[in-house]
C-alpha cells in the first residue's frame, strides 16, 4: 500500500491556478464590467422592443 500512496497525484494548489491566469495571452482584453453593461443593455433593448412592438 505504501507504493500506492507515493504515486498518488497531489491536490491542485491555488498557486498553480494563479500562475495560469496571470499568463499573458493574445486576444481581446475586455473588463468584466463592460461585458455586464453590454449584456444589460441587450436585455433592456429586447424588453423595450417587446413592449413597444407587441406580437399578436
Image (tube, rainbow, N blue to C red):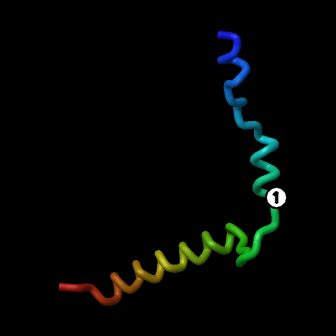
Residue 35 place in picture, x, y as percent: 62, 72
In this picture, is 6 found above or below 26?
above
Is 48 situated left or right of 36 in this image?
A: left
On the image, which quarter does residue 31 sit in? bottom right
Q: Residues within 10 Å of mark 1 (few under 14, many from 20)?
A: few
The mark total stands at: 1
Residue located beneath label 1 in the image: 22
On the image, which quarter does residue 26 sit in? bottom right
Q: Residue at x 69, y 15 (%)?
A: 3
Is 37 situated left or right of 30 in this image?
A: left
Residue 37 place in picture, x, y as percent: 61, 74
Relative depth, front residue between 43 and 54: 43
On the image, which quarter does residue 12 sit in? top right
Q: Residue at x 58, y 77 (%)?
A: 38
In this picture, is 35 found above or below 18?
below
In this picture, is 3 found above or below 54?
above
Which residue in the rendered view is the most extreme toward the left?
Answer: 56
Which residue in the rendered view is the most extreme toward the bottom?
Answer: 53
Residue 50 place in picture, x, y as percent: 34, 82
- Mark 1 lies on a secondary structure that is helix
- In the picture, the quarter occupied by the C terminus is bottom left
- In the picture, the quarter occupied by the N terminus is top right
Which residue in the rendered view is the most extreme toward the top?
Answer: 1
Relative depth, front residue between 17 and 6: 6
In this picture, is 20 found above or below 5?
below
Relative depth, front residue between 17 and 49: 17
Q: Residue at x 35, y 88 (%)?
A: 52
Q: Residue at x 73, y 20 (%)?
A: 6
Residue 14 place in picture, x, y as percent: 77, 40
Amino acid at each position: 500500500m505504501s507504493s500506492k500512496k507515493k504515486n498518488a497525484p497531489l491536490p491542485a494548489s491555488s498557486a498553480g491556478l494563479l500562475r495560469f491566469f496571470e499568463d499573458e495571452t493574445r486576444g481581446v482584453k475586455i473588463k468584466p464590467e463592460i461585458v455586464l453593461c453590454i449584456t444589460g443593455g441587450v436585455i433592456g433593448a429586447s424588453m423595450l422592443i417587446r413592449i413597444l412592438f407587441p406580437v399578436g
